Amino acid sequence: MREEALQAIADAPDLPALQAVKTRYVGKNGLITKELGSLGKLPPEERKARGAEINALRQSIEAALAEREAVLKREALDARLASEAIDVTLPGLPLPAGGLHPINRVFEDLTAIYERMGYAVIEGPEVEDEHHNFEALNVPWYHPARDLQDTFWLEDGRLLRTHTSPMQVRYMVEHEPPLKIVVRGKVYRYEATDATHEAMFHQLEGLVVGDGISMADLKGTIAEMARGLYGPGAKVRFQPSYYPFVEPGADFAVWWENPRGESKWLELGGCGMVHPSVFKAVDDLREAAGKPRVYEGKTGFAFGLGPERIAMLKYGIPDIRYFYANDPRVLGQFRGEL
Ligand code: PHE
């Protein structure tokens, strides 16, 4: 039995197999246990010697079991360590890169140009009240200009801002002149959508206020932006226009040429000299907040433009709705462009 048992122990390929061998020989109903149980059938003078023999056998089997168990356990541990090891020399897996939305890319270009000119870049609330969006910008309730901008009204009487111009008012109420800011953000118009109109789009608004700021400063600023966007040869054009919060007011366009040799005037936005009524409305709000009136008698200019138009031309995107339809085939093309 000894030879047979030691051979079985040596042959056990793993711990469960070894456990089976252990049960077979030294378990409760194992062969050794049975041998011991049968001692009683022997004549008393043989029992002692036979008992000692069986015990010696049992001890050698148990010693062999323990030894083999230690070996198998170490093998199992070694195998686990090998299979779970991390090879730090393997090349990394590339994570799919995201990308800036094309509108944000254009905003980054524009704000970089204005930061170079010393402007602060700010944002503001998309939910506005009537006073900041219209009243303080010289657009009283009966003014036909309110029809020009169809408004999303909220149930509490507030609205989604129809332009970024209310931030002119908010900023001037908080800060004294001189100042130079650009405001970037979303605006909303209650309009039917088509290839060039969306209910939500973006604006970049500029405001400069100080002493003796003139229309020449405004034109020079827009020209500098055009050169920043389209190179040193960029041309700008101003045409008289009407916005209640500026006087005089103008629309401006940039002469744009693309690499395919196409060129045309790109109507970019509106601008003008800040209307004295806006300065008065700001001073009224400041006074109500316990701040000094500091805007009457100042001059300044403001402008507003839409980055969507720039992005559509720059990236050859034919329909404004592609920007916000979340179609991965469109936005996926801007992957990795950071
Ligand atoms: N707020 C105007 C618009 O949304 C643009 C504008 C801004 C015009 C500043 C003049 C001055 O159309």
Image (cartoon, rainbow, N blue to C red):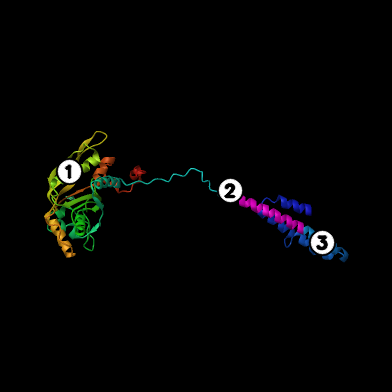
Q: How crowded is mark 1: few (under 14 residues within 10 Å), some or many (20 or more)?
A: few
The residue indicated by pointer 2 is 82
Residue 80's x, y, as percent?
59, 51
**Disc sitting over residue 52 in the figure:** 3
Q: What element carries label 2?
A: helix
Nearest the viewer among 98 and 230 is 230
Relative to 89, is 21 on the left or the right?
right
Q: Up-down: is 221 above or below 244?
A: above
Q: Nearer the viewer, residue 325 or 4?
A: 4
The range drawn in magenta is: 59-80
Q: Residue 200: x, y in percent?
A: 25, 51
Camera-nearest label, 1 or 3:
1
For the point 24% across and 43% down, which residue is it?
A: 310
Name the residue type under label 1. Answer: Gly
Q: In this view, does 198 lie to the left or right of 294?
A: right
Of the residues under marks 1 and 2, which one precedes in the sequence? 2
N-term-proximal mark, 3 vs 2: 3
Task: Answer yes or no: is residue 139 visible.
Answer: no
Q: Residue 270 carries which label?
A: none
* Residue 190 % position (x, y): 22, 54
In the structure shown, which secondary structural element does the residue marked by tag 1 occupy? Answer: helix
Q: Disc 1 to disc 2, how far (Cα)?
A: 70 Å
Q: Which of marks 1 and 2 is in front?
A: 1
Name the foreground residue: 181 vs 247.
Answer: 181
**Is residue 132 found left or right of 78 in the rendered image?**
left
Q: From this viewpoint, is residue 171 visible?
A: yes
CB of mark 1 within 8 Å of CB of mark 2?
A: no
Disc ID at residue 220: 1
Q: Which residue is drawn at 71% across and 57% down?
A: 22
Q: What residue type is labelled 2?
A: Ala
